Image (spheres, helix red, strand yellow):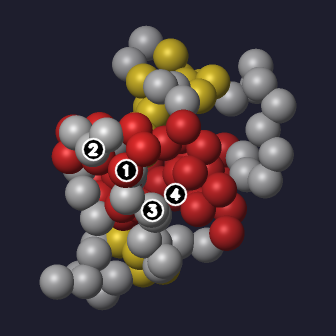
C-alpha cells in the first residue's frame, strides 16, 4: 500500500486527539477541522468512534505511530521531560 500524507485538517485533528482522552464533536470549540477529517482518520485506522457515542472520537495506537513512530504505550513510557517530538511528516501507513 502506498503511504498517504495527511493533509492539514487531518494533522490538526490527529494532533488534538493525541492531547485529549476523547473528543466530542459539537460540545467543544473545534478550530481547524471537522467531521470529514475525523472520518478520514477513522477510515485510515488512526482514530475511532467511541462505542455508544457516535459523535465522540479517540486516537488509536496507530494514530500515535503516525505522529511519533511508536505506540501510545511506548510514548507514555518516556519521562514527561523527555517525550520525543512528533515526526516531521505524518503519513499512513509508515514507510518501512
Camera-nearest label, 3 or 1: 1
Residue sitting at x 38%, y 19%: 51
Can the viewer see residue 72 in this picture?
no
Local SS, label 3: loop
Give the class, few, some or many, for how many residues have Cα within 10 Å of label 1's Cα (few <14, many ≥20): few
Q: Tell me the CA gap for discs 4 and 1.
A: 31 Å
Q: Tell me the CA gap for discs 2 and 4.
A: 29 Å
Residue sitting at x 77%, y 25%: 28
In front of the other: 50 or 69 = 69
Q: Is residue 47 left or right of residue 70?
A: right
Q: Residue farthest to the left?
A: 96
In front of the other: 88 or 9 = 88
Q: Where does the image place residue 61, in percent across and percent down from the top left? A: 27, 45
Can the viewer see residue 30 in this picture?
yes
Q: Where does the image place residue 78, in percent across and percent down from the top left? A: 27, 44
Q: Residue farthest to the front?
A: 81
Residue sitting at x 22%, y 39%: 77
Q: Is residue 32 left or right of residue 67?
A: right
Q: Tell me the CA gap for discs 3 and 4.
A: 24 Å
Label 2, on which residue?
Answer: 78
Local SS, label 4: helix
Q: Tell me the CA gap for discs 3 and 1.
A: 9 Å
Residues at circles 2 and 1 in contact by the CB criterion of under 8 Å: yes
* Sequence-wise first label, 2 or 3: 2
Label 3, on which residue?
Answer: 85
Label 1, on which residue?
Answer: 82
Label 4, on which residue?
Answer: 40
Amino acid at each position: 500500500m502506498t503511504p498517504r500524507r495527511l493533509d492539514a485538517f487531518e494533522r490538526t485533528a490527529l494532533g488534538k486527539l493525541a492531547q485529549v482522552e476523547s473528543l466530542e464533536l459539537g460540545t467543544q470549540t473545534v478550530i481547524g477541522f471537522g467531521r470529514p477529517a475525523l472520518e478520514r482518520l477513522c477510515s485510515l485506522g488512526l482514530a475511532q468512534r467511541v462505542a455508544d457515542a457516535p459523535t465522540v472520537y479517540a486516537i488509536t495506537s496507530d494514530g500515535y505511530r503516525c505522529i511519533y513512530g511508536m505506540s501510545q504505550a511506548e510514548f507514555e513510557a518516556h519521562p514527561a521531560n523527555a517525550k520525543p517530538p512528533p515526526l516531521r511528516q505524518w503519513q499512513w501507513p509508515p514507510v518501512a
